[in-house]
Amino acid sequence: MRVMECDVPSGSALDPDLIRNAYFRDSYRAPLTRPDLAIADVFFALFGHMPLWIKILLIVRNAVAKAFGLEAPTVAEIMKPTARSEYRVGEKIGPWPIFFIADDEIVAGRDNKHLDFRLSVLKARDGDAMSVAVSTICTVHNMFGKIYLFFIVPFHRSGVQSLMSRAVVAKRI
């Protein structure tokens, strides 16, 4: 199985109303051949190995966001994400605050003036096999949020699929 686009899994902790009313949402699923990994380890197996082109795009995006007075991750959070052995709601995992964490799912994201986003990493059962689903949900607050997503979504889609594919090929997940 390769990375495939899918619906946001019904077993996710993401609020169904939030999913239904989102201005933007997507979800991708990939095989999980290492189901013994803790959910934070799955998160870092995906987002802790970003290629330089993604890091550069994120740093440029964050500089523009900060110029508009928006909260954005630091260069250090993008270039060298730090993994810890334990996480709690309210702490950051990589560059994002955690909104929910359980053994099989972590939901992180950020609330800003232009939009709120949530990123779910969920370990899920696919019949006899396991998979990981990465879902993103964005709620837009104004026209700037819509314009922002117009430019970011193509990079987001290819970036998430690339990160997941790389993790599968490297056998990190």
Image: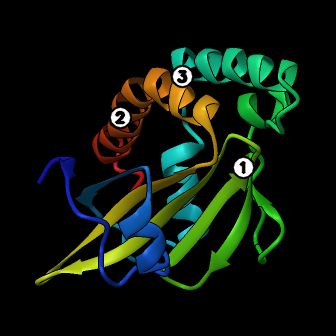
On-image quarter of the N terminus: bottom left
93 in relation to 77, above or below: below
How far separated are the C-alphas under marks 1 and 3?
A: 14 Å
SS of the residue under disc 2:
helix
Q: Residues within 10 Å of mark 2 (few under 14, many from 20)?
A: some
Q: In this view, does 140 lie to the left or right of 65?
A: left
Name the residue located 24 percent from the left edge and 81 percent from the top edge: 125
Please state the horizontal and vertical placement of residue 18, each as a whole percent of the image.
Answer: 48, 70
Q: Closer to the camera: disc 2 or disc 3?
A: 2
105 in relation to 117, above or below: below
Please state the horizontal and vertical placement of residue 52, each as a whole percent of the image.
Answer: 57, 17
Which disc number belongs to residue 157?
A: 2
Which disc number belongs to residue 54?
A: 3
First in sequence: mark 1 vs mark 2:
1
Name the residue located 58 percent from the left edge and 68 percent from the top edge: 107
How far separated are the C-alphas under marks 1 and 2?
A: 19 Å
- Residue type (three-letter) at the residue carrying disc 2: Arg
User: Which residue is disc 1 drawn over?
Assistant: 94
How far separated are the C-alphas under marks 2 and 3?
A: 12 Å
